Image (tube, grey):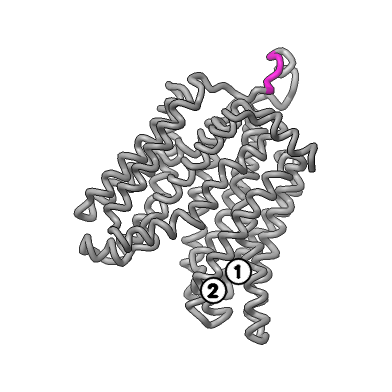
């Protein structure tokens, strides 16, 4: 234990901790604003005088725009430095938040979402390369988990807090508050990030790297492609069921009021797993990937067991365990797979990360679409499809485990 803490203290200077903390807060702000309308759909719909389903499209449409815009945005940003590109992406987010703050009709609100989604892929393709630029290779997983802790905090604190603020002071004012938070983060990153952010501090002599097959760009793309494909399948498996989270909870325990409780369990388990997997991801990247997808399978199996004719308290217990496993595995997906991309695509980090972000967004859209197609037949098929796809993903990762080394 002491040796681990000493190693972390040695690797991460005070300046590095500040950079990682600010990047984590940037992910917190991005995810909070991305999911900002979720808790206040009826309020926004009433104020803008449109249907609730049209406001719901502000969330699902965001993912589609983000997927489509990722490659063009990354290509254009390749002409400037990583620091400038990161600040540009956050600048778009600030503009989007202010546009939402003054939106008085649906078209303006759509414009706000499109503006943020336009640089969503750029931001997520940069945040980990920037975070790990000065981190030795053996600490990439830890640094990635620290940055992605902002995602967990956004789901646990950010979205509920923005919903509560919207109910107290109005959703327009809340958008201004989010913009102020993003401005503060951007200013902090402007002063803390170095002007010339290069690849990891553990780079070795170019001649030696040229002799190492892992530095071959084609080989790196093969490994990155494998990781991106399994990211897509696992995210799709997740969203098949997660899109209908409330319906599953009601079907298993028969109490709609329990949805908020299980969402909290889901989020808290995710926060804990982010720290846990961050620690062990560096020591055993392959083992972390196997464990994470294996836990996904157990979560889906736990959801399925809720369909059995068991006593209510037993079903509550089964669902609680399933939510702990599900929330933990979900939070671990991004740091484990993203750090694997950084390790495998050393020379093409931004482009490989762009592919990763695009596959992640496609997985969201595909999973939601599959869930919509099967939910009418029976809710039972939601966790069943989640289990089958997760199990196939686990088998695939075990077959191509070299990509996660």
Using residue 298 as the reference point, say whether residue 133 is left or right of it: left
Q: Which mark is residue 246?
A: none
Task: Measure the alpha-carbon separation of dots 1 and 2.
Answer: 9 Å
Query: Would residue 103 be visible to someone looking at this image?
Result: yes
Write down the residue under mark 1: 383
Give the residue drawn at x 71%, y 44%. 279
Q: Earlier in the sequence, mark 1 or mark 2?
A: 2
Residue 115 placement: quadrant: top left
Residue bounds of the magenta highlight: 202-206
Mark 1: few/some/many CA within 10 Å (<14, 14-19, 20+): many
Residue 365, relative to residue 223: is it above or below? below
Q: Residue at x 57, y 28 (%)?
A: 15
> Could you tell whether 135 is left or right of 4 in the image?
left
Say if the magenta span includes residue 203.
Answer: yes
Q: Which residue is mark 2?
A: 248
Q: Secondary structure at mark 1?
A: helix
């Amino acid at each position: 234990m002491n040796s681990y803490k000493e190693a972390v203290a040695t690797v991460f200077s005070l300046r590095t901790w500040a950079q990682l903390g600010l990047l984590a807060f940037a992910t917190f702000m991005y995810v909070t604003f991305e999911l900002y309308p979720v808790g206040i759909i009826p309020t926004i719909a009433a104020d803008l005088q449109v249907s609730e389903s049209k406001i719901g499209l502000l969330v699902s449409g965001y993912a589609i725009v983000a997927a489509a815009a990722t490659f063009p945005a990354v290509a254009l940003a390749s002409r400037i430095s990583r620091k400038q590109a990161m600040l540009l992406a956050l600048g778009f987010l600030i503009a989007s938040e202010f546009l939402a703050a003054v939106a008085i009709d649906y078209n303006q609100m759509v414009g706000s979402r499109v503006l943020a989604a336009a640089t969503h892929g750029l931001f997520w393709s940069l945040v980990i390369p920037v975070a790990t630029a000065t981190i030795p290779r053996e600490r990439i997983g830890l640094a990635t988990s620290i940055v992605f802790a902002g995602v967990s905090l956004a789901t646990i604190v950010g979205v509920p807090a923005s919903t509560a603020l919207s109910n107290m002071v109005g959703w327009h004012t809340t958008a201004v508050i989010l913009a102020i938070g993003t401005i503060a983060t951007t200013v902090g990153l402007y002063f803390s990030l170095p002007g010339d952010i290069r690849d990891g501090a553990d780079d070795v002599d170019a001649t030696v790297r040229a002799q190492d097959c892992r530095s071959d760009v084609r080989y790196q793309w093969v490994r990155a492609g494998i990781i991106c494909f399994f990211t897509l399948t696992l995210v799709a498996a997740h969203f098949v069921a997660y899109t209908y989270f409330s319906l599953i909870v009601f079907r298993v325990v028969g109490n709609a009021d329990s949805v908020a409780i299980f969402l909290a369990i889901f989020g808290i388990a995710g926060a804990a797993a982010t720290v846990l997997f961050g620690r062990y991801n560096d020591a055993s990247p392959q083992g972390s990937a196997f464990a994470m997808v294996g836990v996904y399978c157990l979560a889906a199996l736990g959801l399925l067991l809720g369909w059995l004719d068991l006593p209510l308290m037993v079903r509550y217990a089964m669902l609680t365990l399933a939510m702990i496993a599900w929330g933990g595995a979900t939070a671990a997906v991004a740091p484990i797979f993203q750090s694997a991309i950084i390790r495998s695509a050393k020379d093409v980090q931004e482009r490989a990360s762009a592919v990763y972000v695009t596959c992640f967004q496609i997985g969201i859209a595909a999973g939601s679409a599959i869930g919509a197609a099967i939910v009418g037949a029976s809710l039972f098929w939601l966790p069943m499809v989640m289990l089958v796809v997760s199990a196939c993903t686990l088998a695939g990762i075990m077959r191509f485990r070299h990509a996660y080394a």
